[in-house]
């Protein structure tokens, strides 16, 4: 997660996820942590930008019932901040997105895992 204020990088946070974590879950973790950061810092207005359209659509979906995503929805509703979620095109020269990618790669160099996720069993496998 990279924090920009008035167009300048203010700070960043990185987390190491286990190797089995999907890209989708990694993007959801980043959004969850960004929302949590806004709440902790009592930021009045924030834009959270992600290139994962799937993650953003899942958070906005009325039918979504996975606990992890419901927790993000509840956190967004419980905050006193005006937090908006935005989509950006990946690898299109967006400074914030490029910095977030850089720190995501740096996080893979850490030995200590901050978040551990198991892949669900695919009981209903397609043939």
Image: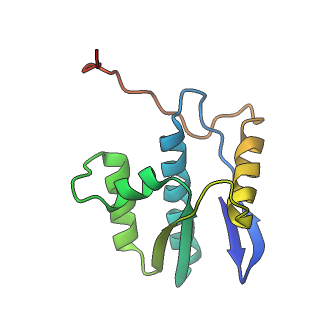
Q: Residue furthest top?
A: 127
Q: Residue furthest left?
A: 63
In this picture, is 53 found above or below 114?
below
**Quadrant location of the C terminus in the rendered image:** top left
Residue name at image x 54 percent, y 39 percent: 23
Q: Is residue 90 left or right of 70 when viewed as pictured?
A: right
In this picture, is 109 found above or below 2?
above
Residue 70 place in picture, x, y as percent = 31, 55
Q: How is the image coloured?
A: rainbow
Q: How many marks?
A: 0
Residue 50 place in picture, x, y as percent = 55, 59
Residue name at image x 46 percent, y 80 percent: 81
- Whether residue 59 appears in this view of the structure is yes
Q: Is residue 81 left or right of 60 when viewed as pictured?
A: right
> Which residue is nearer to you in this view: 126 or 2?
126
In this picture, is 63 found above or below 86?
above
Residue name at image x 31 percent, y 47 percent: 67
Q: Is residue 17 left or right of 36 when viewed as pictured?
A: right
Residue 10 place in picture, x, y as percent = 76, 72
Q: Is residue 96 left or right of 31 when viewed as pictured?
A: right
- Whether residue 13 appears in this view of the structure is no
Q: What is the quadrant of residue 96 in the picture?
A: bottom right
**Quadrant location of the N terminus in the rendered image:** bottom right
């Amino acid at each position: 997660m990279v924090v920009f204020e008035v167009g300048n990088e203010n700070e960043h946070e990185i987390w190491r996820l286990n190797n089995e974590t999907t890209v989708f879950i990694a993007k959801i973790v980043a959004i969850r942590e960004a929302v949590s950061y806004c709440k902790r810092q009592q930021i009045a207005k924030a834009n959270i930008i992600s290139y994962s359209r799937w993650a953003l659509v899942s958070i906005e979906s009325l039918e979504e019932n996975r606990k992890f995503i419901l927790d993000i929805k509840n956190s967004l509703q419980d905050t006193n901040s005006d937090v908006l979620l935005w989509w950006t095109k990946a690898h299109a020269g967006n400074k914030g997105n490029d910095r977030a990618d850089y720190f995501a790669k740096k996080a893979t160099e850490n030995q200590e895992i901050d978040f551990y996720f198991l892949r669900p069993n695919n009981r209903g496998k397609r043939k």
